[in-house]
Image: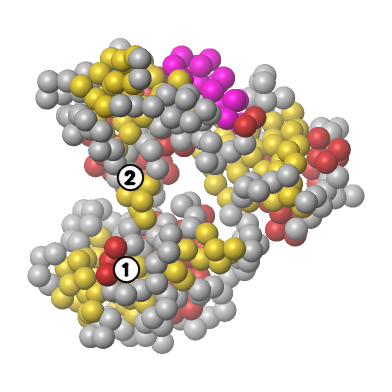
Amino acid sequence: MDSSLLIIGAGQAAGQLIASLAQDGFRGAVTVVGAESYPPYQRPPLSKKFLAGEITLDRLYVRPAAFYDKAGTRLLLGKQAVAIDRAARTVALSDGETLPYSTLVLATGSRPRRLTLPGADLDGVFYLRTIDDVQAIRARFAAGKRLVIVGGGYIGLELAAVAVKQGLQVTVLEQVDRLMARSVGVAVSAFYARVHGEEGVVVQTGTAVDGFEGSGHVRQVVCPGMRHDADIVVVGVGALHNTELARDAGLAVDNGIIVDAQCRTDDPAVYAIGDCTNQLHPQIGRRLRLESVHNALEQGKIAAAAICGRPPPPVQTPWFWSDQYDVKLQTAGLSEGHSEVVVRGTPDRGRSFAVFYLRDSVLVAVDAVNRVSEFMAAKQLIAEGARPDPARLRDERIAMKDIRL
């Protein structure tokens, strides 16, 4: 068992790793280097309850500060790792300090994709990724203010749901022809466009942004043939994985840091977990990089087991979720490459339905909107590689627990 463990990154994957190491009986010294000044925390509530002021800062933390003291974990926060010397097994920090390691875990996560358009550096143009980002955005919120959100993905739409409820005038601009296009199917995209419209959000799809204008502070978002007045702009156009540290150290990187089933890189002394990794998923049958809480938590558990010489936990079906208004979306599996879509319920009215995606008759994914039973049952069916009868999936008179019968 390794005696000295160094973790670079202090996000949710790192927090889970530390908790799992303690549970698995790791007795070595653990040091965590985090660029932010906060201990490991959850990111999903940032664009929901934390932004809305419904939960306090301490409720974001994966574990209270006392946990790290008890576990013997040293937190070096507000520090940046700048280089890895794999031969010497050391990591250099931006302040000149050098840290040794027996085992290194890279949990470097991802960062927002930033725009390089004219005016993108104006005051009032924000990105939402960190606690500090949310606090800065929330400080500008006031009823009647005009908020323009660039990007119609999860983060942008969750932000829109909070802001419009607080009395802001909200416009969402999405470059492609539908909302959340990279994550959900057509019926779900149309549903969310309808719901946001019903709540008072102006949604414009197929709308590119050319730049931002204002004197020191943003005042307008410029699009082809139109302008949108803005007091606040939040950009949510995807993320970039933080793999530069690994790449510069000579580790294999290809759309993420390449890791094996135990989250090891091609250097047996170095592991990687979370958003920054690219791993073969046995249920999917190919390598992929998953940006999700579920993946971060699972890889934290897998790496801890490997470091402690314990059997890995069973592989689970990937799943995601989003909360907007009174609507909970739960997604399991990956729908890309599907050949058939089965809808259960009525997406064009009400706020409860499920969409199943099949590939060559095999259930590969589900988008469940306020349908916990459909989500839970489909998640299990996906894991089993089941071939459910589409007619039975569609028929709401048949309980989900009886679908396979």
Identify the residue under disc 1.
247
Which residue is rendered at x = 39% and y = 27% of the image? 208
Residue 282, position as x, y percentages in the image: 63, 66
- The quadrant of the rendering that contains the N terminus is bottom left
Q: Is residue 339 left or right of residue 154?
A: right
Q: Is any part of residue 290 visible from this angle?
A: yes
Please name the residue shown 90% across and 49% down the image: 405
Residue 401 relative to residue 368: left or right: right
Residue 196 is covered by the magenta coloring: yes
Q: Note whether 106 is above or below 351 in the view shown.
A: below
Q: Residue at x 79, y 55 (%)?
A: 386
Q: CA distance from mark 2 to mark 1?
A: 19 Å
Part of the protein shown in magenta:
188-203
Check disc 1: other Cα within 10 Å, few if <14, some if 14-19, many if 20+.
Answer: some
Instruction: Say which residue label 2 marks.
Output: 112
Can residue 177 be found in the magenta stretch?
no
Q: Main secondary structure of the magenta part?
A: helix
Q: Amino acid at mark 1?
A: Arg
Residue 358: horizontal and vertical position, in percent? 74, 46
Hey, what amino acid is under mark 2?
A: Pro
